[in-house]
């Protein structure tokens, strides 16, 4: 059972454009929703995260939009740059206690053309 | 401060051989996770430890896989005997806990079983 569904699988955007990646989750007990960025040959690294008490979080050119009723959240990359080309993973977890067992989406390969 | 350190970075072995992957988490982090990444299945959680104790090993695919964390600064993932379908990138990640869900990933161990 795939608990976090991510789309699209791949995305090509022109420099300066907006990249949008969507995720949907099933488990209503999830209360922590991070996005990770992975470059080739490297491990994933946390990009930005949101909790369900807010509907949007912005850090620089990166914004998470969260819709609790629809059980969906998305990553928007404004003014996309070639250096943003990477694989992006959404994830979700229940943050009770000190256990952060993340369930990842399958990833989106983003290519930003110069 | 050093990040999560994994070894070996690359391992090529023949079917039936024993494989041991090693991980040194970030000092002070009390949770450690082993993930497996493949194109088909994405990032899968195999097992995670909290304060050196295995909490959830439901992701370990079968008895050929085992993981240990003898102390706070070292963990191993062992596959015995290895099979070609075990070929993947294995990531170790650690988490400081303390109300943050950020996982810090190592650079991974790429395993090829011939």
Image (spheres, coloured by chain):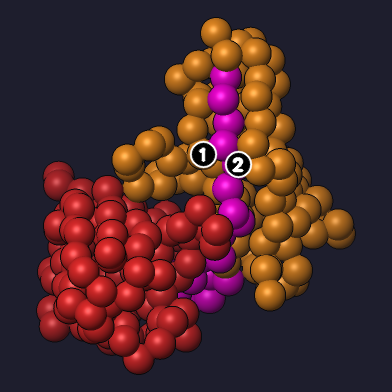
Chain colours: A orange, B red
User: Magenta-highlighted stretch: main secondary structure?
Assistant: loop
- Relative to B7, is B112 on the left or the right? right
Examine the rendering and report whether any part of residue B75 can be seen.
no
Q: Quadrant of residue B17?
A: bottom left
Density class for disc 2 (Cα within 10 Å; few <14, some 14-19, many ≥20) is many
- Relative to B108, is A6 on the left or the right? right
Q: CA distance from mark 1 to mark 2?
A: 5 Å
Residue at left 46%, top 58%? B38
- Relative to A24, is A79 on the left or the right? left
Residue at left 55%, top 58%? B40
Examine the rendering and report whether any part of residue B39 can be seen.
yes
The region drawn magenta spans A94-112
Was residue A110 drawn as part of the magenta stretch in this picture? yes
From the viewer's side, name the closer residue of A16 and B11.
B11
From the viewer's side, name the closer residue of B26 and A53.
B26
* Secondary-structure class at tag 2: strand
- Residue beneath label 2, please? A108
* Above-or-below relation of A88 to A50: above
* Secondary-structure class at tag 1: strand
In the picture as drawn, the residue positioned furthest to the right comes out as A69
Q: Position of residue A80 (x, y in %)?
A: 59, 18
Was residue A18 drawn as part of the magenta stretch in this picture? no
Q: Position of residue B49 (x, y in %)?
A: 32, 79
In the picture as drawn, the residue positioned furthest to the bottom comes out as B63
- Residue beneath label 1, please? A87
């Amino acid at each position: 059972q795939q608990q976090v569904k991510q789309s699209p699988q791949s995305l090509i955007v022109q420099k300066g454009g907006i990249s949008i990646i969507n995720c949907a989750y099933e488990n209503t007990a999830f209360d922590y929703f991070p996005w990770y960025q992975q470059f080739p040959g490297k491990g994933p690294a946390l990009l930005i995260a949101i909790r369900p008490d807010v509907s949007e979080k912005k850090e620089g050119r990166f914004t998470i939009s969260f819709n609790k009723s629809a059980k969906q959240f998305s990553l928007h990359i404004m003014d996309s740059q070639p250096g943003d080309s990477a694989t992006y993973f959404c994830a979700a977890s229940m943050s009770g206690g000190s256990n952060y067992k993340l369930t990842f989406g399958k990833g989106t390969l983003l290519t930003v053309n110069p | 401060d050093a990040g999560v350190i994994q070894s070996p970075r690359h391992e090529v072995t023949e079917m039936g051989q024993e494989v041991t992957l090693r991980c040194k988490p970030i000092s002070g982090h009390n949770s450690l996770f082993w993930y497996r990444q493949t194109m088909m299945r994405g990032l899968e959680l195999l097992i995670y430890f909290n304060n050196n104790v295995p909490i959830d090993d439901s992701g370990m695919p079968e008895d050929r896989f085992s993981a240990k964390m003898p102390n706070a600064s070292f963990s191993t993932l062992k596959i015995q005997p290895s099979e070609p379908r075990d070929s993947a990138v294995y990531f170790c990640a650690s988490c400081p806990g303390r109300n943050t869900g950020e996982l810090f990933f190592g650079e991974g161990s790429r395993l090829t079983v011939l």
